[in-house]
Amino acid sequence: MPEQQPAELISEAAIDARVRELAEQISSDYADKGDIVLVGVLKGSFIFLADLSRRLTIPRTIEFIAVSSYDSGSVSSGAVRLVMDVRGNIEGRDVLIVEDIVDTGHTLKYLIGMLESHRPASIRTCALLHKPGSAEVDVPIDYIGFGIGDEWVVGYGLDYAERDRTLPYIGMVEPDDQ
Ligand code: 5GP
């Protein structure tokens, strides 16, 4: 029997429209700065970063950082581990962290602290998705694509145990471990 596709939560068209709006907002907010550094958080943000970065109208460069917060399932341990740091020099630069989703907030909080140690001129944060009901720590999110409930979402870069990352829409799955 063919496998069932995850139920759609946010359509491809809605994502596209929102990414364009975010890019417009960010381009306007940074219009008077030099070029910004977009720091994409691997792996989940890779598609969002690709689309967002191509729609910005300001000069920008791309860096990646990788952290691991959950083993392979969907339960947060709260402990965040750095897997790969940025390669380029971001000292004195305006940094925009590009995250796929902010859930408890532990990952973003850790990332801000980590990147601050590189002494950038400024750090702002952008998350495609936010689960406001699951927040455990207070962390600033300057740009948010969509607020969602506490369902586990996949697609547009997000996975469940490495599956469904390349779905063109945001879908919901029932994790086995909840
Ligand atoms: P936090 O540290 O805010 O609890 O979690 C952030 C990270 O957890 C995200 O970068 C993402 O990797 C993962 N995460 C949280 N909720 C979801 C979800 O619904 N779907 C997926 N695929 N990842 C999630």
Image (cartoon, grey):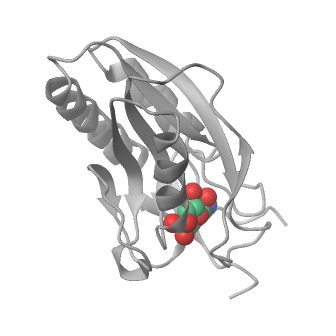
Closer to the camera, 141 or 165? 141
Residue 159 shows in this picture:
yes
What x and y, as percent, mark residue 126? Answer: 36, 45
Percent x, y of residue 74: 68, 74
Residue found 40% across the figure and 77% down from its top: 149
Q: Ligand 1 is in which quadrant of the figure? A: bottom right
Quadrant location, the N terminus: bottom right
Name the residue rendered at 22%, 24% in the picture.
27
Residue at the right extreme, as displayed: 1
Above-or-below relation of 68 to 104: above
Quadrant for the C terminus in the image: bottom right
Q: Is residue 100 left or right of residue 162?
A: left
Q: Residue furthest bottom?
A: 178
Q: Which residue is depicted at the point 28% across and 42% down?
A: 18
Which residue corresponds to the image point at 60% horizontal and 45% vertical from the top-left?
Answer: 157
State whether residue 87 is above or below residue 177.
Answer: above
Residue 7 visible, this orientation: no
Task: Tell me: 84 left or right of 98.
Answer: right
Q: In the image shown, does 107 or 130 lie closer to the viewer?
A: 107
> Which image quadrant is residue 148 in?
bottom left
Examine the image and state in which quarter residue 35 appears.
Answer: top left
* Residue 159 at x, y percent in the picture: 67, 56
How many marks the image carries: the answer is 0
Instruction: Report whether 28 appears left or right of 80.
Output: left
Q: Is residue 12 above or below residue 151?
A: above
